[in-house]
Amino acid sequence: MDSGSGAPPAPHEHERDNPQQDGDELRGGSAAPVQEGTRVEVSAATITRMMGIAAVSDIKLLEGRIDLLTAKVVSMMAKLDKIVSTLASMPAASDIDRLEIQIGTLKSLVREVLEEIPSAVSPRTREKERAESQEQSRKLRESIKSSPDQD
């Protein structure tokens, strides 16, 4: 064998034909370094990973995350629709004014009915109740007028 030429020594016949030794080198089980003339096999999965191509498991993982995100967005949209419908059904200032007028009408009808019914209540007590009722009604109107419009 020529040791001064710088070329690696030729493999012996029994080393070339031993498949067990080649398998050990591929799995990293052998401590011997890979020599220049030997060929190392690389799997297709390793090549695709090195090229940056997504594998099936990567795509399935991404699909799962996208599905989860889609479910969250749908849930948020349902909540937003519920909030919008609740806000739409809230009474506006004009609705409150109509209610105030209707309540005032009912109060006056109740007063008329109570005045027509003879009662054991003295007229003095009745006048006092009427004055209190009118005062409460005035305060209610003032508080509604002083509140900002919600139109």
Image (cartoon, grey):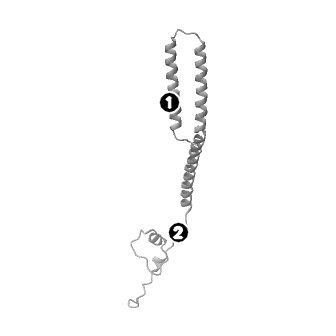
Q: Secondary structure at mark 1?
A: helix
Q: Where does residue 3 sit, x and y in percent of width and height?
A: 38, 89
Q: Where does residue 98 sit, x and y in percent of width and height?
A: 61, 33
Residue under label 1, please give it. Answer: 139
Mark 2 or mark 1: whose residue is earlier in sequence: 2
Q: CA distance from mark 2 to mark 1?
A: 75 Å
Q: Nearer the viewer, residue 109 or 31?
A: 109
Residue at 51% from the left image edge and 11% from the top image edge = 122
Residue under label 2, please give it. Answer: 52
Rendered-image quadrant of the N terminus: bottom left
Q: Amino acid at mark 2?
A: Gly
Q: Nearer the viewer, residue 80 or 108?
A: 108
Q: Are marks 2 and 1 in contact (CB under 8 Å)?
A: no
User: Label 1 crowding class (10 Å Cα cut-off): few <14, some 14-19, many 20+?
Assistant: few
User: Label 2 crowding class (10 Å Cα cut-off): few <14, some 14-19, many 20+?
Assistant: few
Q: Is residue 90 visible?
A: no
Rendered-image quadrant of the C terminus: top right
Asked if residue 104 is positioned above or below residue 71 in the image, the reply reads: above
In this rendering, which labeled residue sits more in front, label 2 or label 1?
Answer: 1
Q: Amino acid at mark 1?
A: Lys
Q: Where does residue 97 sit, x and y in percent of width and height?
A: 59, 34
Q: Where does residue 24 sit, x and y in percent of width and height?
A: 44, 69
Asked if residue 110 is positioned above or below residue 57 in the image, the reply reads: above
Asked if residue 137 is positioned above or below residue 80 in the image, the reply reads: above
Q: Secondary structure at mark 2?
A: loop
Q: Is residue 26 left or right of residue 116?
A: left
Asked if residue 85 is positioned above or below residue 42 in the image, the reply reads: above
Residue at 44% from the left image edge and 84% from the top image edge = 10
